[in-house]
Image (tube, rainbow, N blue to C red):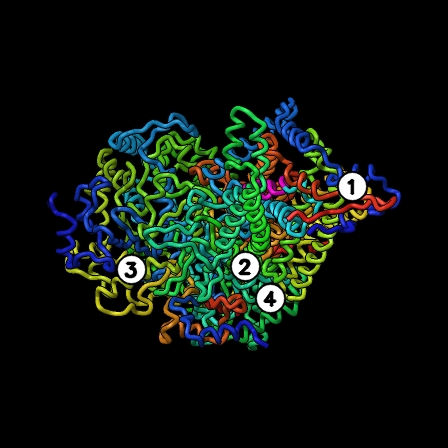
Amino acid sequence: MSEKFSRRDFLKLAGVGAATSAILTGCGPASRYVKREPYMQMPEYNYNGQSTYYATTCRECAAGCGLIVRTVQGRAIKTEGNAGNPLNLGKTCARGQATLHGLYNPDRVTDPQKRSSRGSGSTQVMDWDAAIQVVADALKNNKPEEIAFLMGMAPDHLFDLVSDLASATGMNAPLRFGALGMFEARATLSKAAENLFGEASLPFFDVGGAQVVFSFGANFLETWLSPVSYTRGFAGLREAKTKMRGKFVQFESRMSQTGGKADEWIPLRPGTEALVALAIGKLASEIRGGAMPRAFENVDPIDTASKSGIKLETLEHLAGMFAGSNGALAIPGGPALGQSNGLAVAEAVLALNAISDNFGKPGGVYLSPLAPNQSEYQRPASAQEMQEFVQKMADGKIKVLFVHGVNPLFELPTALGFGGASKSVSQIISFATFPDETAREADYVFPDHHGLESWGYQRVATGSAQPVLSGAQPVVSPYYNTRATVDVLITAAQLAGGSFASALPFKDEVEFLNGKVSALMGEVDGSISAPDLATFMAYFQQHGGYWKNSDERVAPKAGDALNREISAEEAEFAGEGEFFFVPFVSPTLAEAGANKPWLQELPDPTTTVMWNTWVEMNPETAHELGIENDDVVRIVSEAGELEVPVYLYPAIRPDTIAIPFGQGHTAYGRYAENRGVNPADLLGQHFNEAGDLAFAGMKVKVEKTGVKKPLSRLESIMGVYGIGLGEEH
Amino acid sequence: MAYDKKHAEHAPAGRHNGHSEEHLREKHLMLDPLPRGQMNDMVMESMLEKPTWKYWLVVGILSFIVVYFLFYKWSILIMKGQGEAGVMRPDYWGIFLVNTVFWIGISHAGTFISAILRVFRAEFRRPFTRAAELMTTFGLVQAGFSIFMHMGRVWLAYWLMPYPNQRMLWPNLHSPLTWDLLAITTYLLSSTMYLFLPLIPDVAMARDRSTGWRKTFYKTLALGFRGTEGEWTHLRNAMNIFAFAIIPVMFSVHTIVSWDFAAATRPGWSSTIFGPYFIVGALHSGMGAAIVVLAVIRGTMKHMKYFIRAEHFDAIGKLMLIISMAWAYFFFNDYMVQWYGGDKWTQQLLHFHEAGPMGWMWFAMLICNVAIPWAILWNPKWRATPWLVGTVGIIINVGMWFERYIIIPISVTINRMPFTWRLYEPGIEVPMGIGTVALFILLYMIASKLIPLIPVWEVQEGQMAHELKKFGRETVVSVSELE
Amino acid sequence: MVTLSDLKISEVKLGEEQTGKWGMVIDQDICTGCQACVAACAMENNITFVGEEDSGYGRSMHWIRIERFWEGEYPEVKMTANQPMLCQQCGHATCEPVCPAFATVHSQAEQLNLQVYNRCVGTRYCANNCPYQVRSFNWRDYQRPEPLPNQFNPDVTVRRMGVMEKCTFCIQRIHKAQDKAKSEGREVADGEFTTACAQACPANAITFGRVDDPESMVSQLAKRSHGVKHLEELGTLPNVTYFKGG
């Protein structure tokens, strides 16, 4: 296409009328070749007082929700959910709303930087040509097997590009990792699916269609897998329009935001989830009659009751509830899987669904459909795989490490030793948008655009009945001197020559994207179709992606899910100490929200605390220990210790304490730095059979420090807890 | 139309037997006349006396407090916003409004003493009407300052005044704050005029006895008053009109202040008895403040022991006792009205007052306002001891400040949304409040050097009207009606 | 005995327009407390953040907050249904008559409680008198460092220090929809637009629309028997209906 070809001409060609505020604008690939105007000059398709809306993909977590971003005169003003995207149907979570505070964050990396020494704050601004030369040299001057890519969880176009590059050149295959995946225990879930159904995939739980939902630790209303989609499912469960209001029971030792919505909250002893699931299965099978499945044979409900701390009557009542419903659904997830017996828990809970025979039925368990341009399920790296990688780094087998979209120094437990191992890596190049901990330990930072300034696509791993490929396009011109990492890699590969150049024979990112997306043009049943690539791409951007029109969820083959032995072993806990330790992901901050001031100011849904980290402790226990609200305590595990103020939380087991993950940054901008603590510092190197970290498998000690640090709460401690009202004696 | 009156009401221990003429003269200013020239000189001397280093020290300290605590801190407050103070959700009103109500309360005694006692011809009022009237004006200045401190955008305060403007934007006459503003403005203007009218003969006297800039100053203030019969008639008429007219204004001001709270939809505030309760409270603190002022004037200024005597402390002490009883009655009444309302939030609030973290203040209020005044003021001897009654006055003012603190920031802690309850922690209000106290004292100290604090003509008029007559061995006080 | 609600009926009979126009229905049973509405509201309405110290001292600027309480003792403890609390846009608002400057006024056209920022002098009487405690005051000039202000919504005034603010039912969206409908010669259709909170809510717990149109979604929902209005006994005629939990 010619240089003079403007976006306007392009859109005419694409058959899209002049932009009105209601029409979504396809920021077609051709606009790549339009010279970017200075910010003060109004971009095309902007009229005074009129908004322009762009469809793109939310990059705040890996779920891949579609966004519509309202822009006015070249500024992004507001994000809304893309109503067309089958994943989120026009909805967003709080993090999606606050993504603009990332885009316009005052602490972004503004230019490519060379760091004088790792960990130091002094950097030298480079120009992009020099930066790309650094990348090219890194590729060229090292053996391919000594080059590694560490990436965020999202299965996006950059991951595809690096995967292609790796397979063509013999580089290490890129590793995708994120703390969310670690705390979700994704690997365990897909491993359990593989063991039970013979297919490694993410199960999809149709909460909306169910009548009774038993969730074993799955925090599906918070950060688990695809929170917006699961929240919609939850609303469907409760909606009393067409059916009875569905019941919801949550099994967990600390009431999560999800557990707070449960009709019945069952505080079982950590580690006994598998036992409880099997006991309920046994009791339910007894109620249903027929032969007792093998899986439940060896479980003794009375013994289970004493081990789990749940009364036998309660177990019987729950079993009756489960057996008595036509649409009972059991979901494993969260801390329940992040224990030494996590895989057994996942299998036991998944197997429970066999009682209500809901596999592949509405209100039951499905396997998530593969995204449109995906041939097989790709799981992010488990913590154990990360540990192996860290070991490789420590052994000096990695000479060059590229990091993009992940902050391993913050997200990986310190005990896994990434920080120490990185010293054995001769060159670390970060593509971070924000000056995070890992970027500070990198030799170079070559900042990628913010998600709202970038092109791309992202495969939706789960959450939608239809296969979805969410499309991304820039909604504003890049605000800083940043450059798309795909472009950097393409140019650097060509400079590096050889197999690198031939692996990435693209002019730029758009050409690469075109190539990837064009494969979908011929497919039937797609949401968009067009006779030529340019039009297809325009539609792709305009609608925010491509998805199949039909439900392609896979019914799991689970004929003998219950006819196999399932271990009912209790979990083992590492470390000395009187308290079970439950780290959980902050529902509002998640792993990367701490630098967005409005996310910091959102009250935590369960405690209403803002701007800090707290440890939740049962008031009775605290009373016995002489601990009060806002007392700073020292939590000691085998792996480390940290000091954090106490929140007396009425809905946590007396033998359990919980700390949210999300704060405790030592870098990452003014709003995140030196605020709160990171519970990952307490986690040791213990894994379950699926390779996920046994993050909920620790026991810790609590020591008083005598210091007080008032937590910033939205709630009134007087009005909610009656403290300081004069009610007490 | 002269008539004799067996006077008993204003003389303590008014038993005539066994009281010699000398004794009566010593006791009662009205019966202890001095030559007019001498008395005028005494007042001039007390005013013109060269200030001692102590005076300058106190003025210096007070000026520093006013400049730093009041004006500097205020500029900080204006620049940085109300966040410097302790206000927040749900305590949107804090000490600034406590001080507003407090100072308006103080200002009440001035009018009460001067106007009501004048209307009822209570003779003991004569030497201290001026000091009391000054208290009204100076107190209102502090109240006004406190209101302006409270406003989020004080530079737009003039929007609350009904001034003609192109956009036809007027203040909202539905709002108790607008009533308040109008009432306080009216009160400030009328009380200032009421202060000024009786001052005319005294400044005329001072004009005739001074030179230099003072001469010009008094000449300007005296408006050419020469003491002719016509001038006196006009002046008396004007003073009479004001004395009567200002009484309803006074009552309206504090009832309207109480409506700021009583008209609101809040537990603890929407109390039907707030009007009289506030009036009595205002008199309580005002009387307390007046007695402190008298004690200080008597103790520090030359010749003042002649003008202000034990009989005055005794008389005001009696008033204080009565008012304290009335306050206790209305406090109880208010509690009953609220308690019988049965609203669960109000019940919660009443409990919170006593048993909450600020319960000590609630009990301290009752001790300061009721227990201590009752324990001390019943005794005629103690009542006539200036320092003791002055101390009680201070204690009552502390108690009354507590009362306002309980009504405002403590009460708004409890509302109908328990999720928002929060306890108020004052910030910059405290130094600024101290600043208003300092300014109040400073204004008095300056005034004591500029205008006669004793209305000499009024004392002389009273002394002319009083006379001791002998009927046989009996000495009898006779008072003749002057008008 | 005459009750407040009787008085309310008699007022309506007197012919005053008290029915309201825009209203909201919030289903607490499906509200998950996820704070998406809070974030969406902040982004749409240029609401400032205040930092740790001030937010912990009751000075946060949230126009909508989610309240939750506890029932029972462990282990039978229950979190009460999340209760999003925002301006109820009362038909007979207690905040309105007390403002001395007419900064808090009733919109006759939209039947909403308006806050006129540039008329507000900061007496904070309205906030004191709001039984729902949903007004927030700009206690300071909260700084939003560059380039955060790029995100400001040009349709919404940026408030400065000393000014009261509160939920507007996204009146800028109402006006935009009305202008558009007018230019196309039609009425605003039900569901054509919604408030930022309702649009974001992943559970669809918030429904917004015309309460004076019996056919609208919000009117249909509000008819459900278990709907309650908060502090209705005060005669404030709130326009937000709540469905309590389960």
Question: What's the CA distance linking mark 4 and mark 2?
Answer: 59 Å
Question: Do badges 3 and 1 share one subunit?
Answer: no
Q: Percent from the top left, x then y, of residue A79? A: 34, 53
Res. C176 mark: 3
Where does label 2 land, which residue? Answer: B264
The amino acid type of the residue labelled 4 equals Ala
Res. A279 mark: 4
Is A224 placed above or below B58 here? below
**For residue B109, side relative to residue A260 (left or right):** right
Question: Do badges 1 and 2 share one subunit?
Answer: yes
The amino acid type of the residue labelled 2 equals Ala
Question: What's the CA distance linking mark 1 and mark 4?
Answer: 88 Å
Is B139 placed above or below B272 here? above
**For residue A253, side relative to residue B77 (left or right):** right
B372 part of magenta stretch: no
The amino acid type of the residue labelled 1 equals Ala
Res. B117 mark: none
Where does label 1 land, which residue? Answer: B384
Question: Do badges 4 and 3 share one subunit?
Answer: no
Asked if the residue under mark 2 is in contact with the one under mark 1, i.e. CB atoms within 8 Å, the reply is: no
Q: Nearer the viewer, mark 1 or mark 4?
A: 1
State which tag comes first along the sequence, 1 or 2. Answer: 2
Q: Percent from the top left, x then y, of residue A87? A: 35, 60
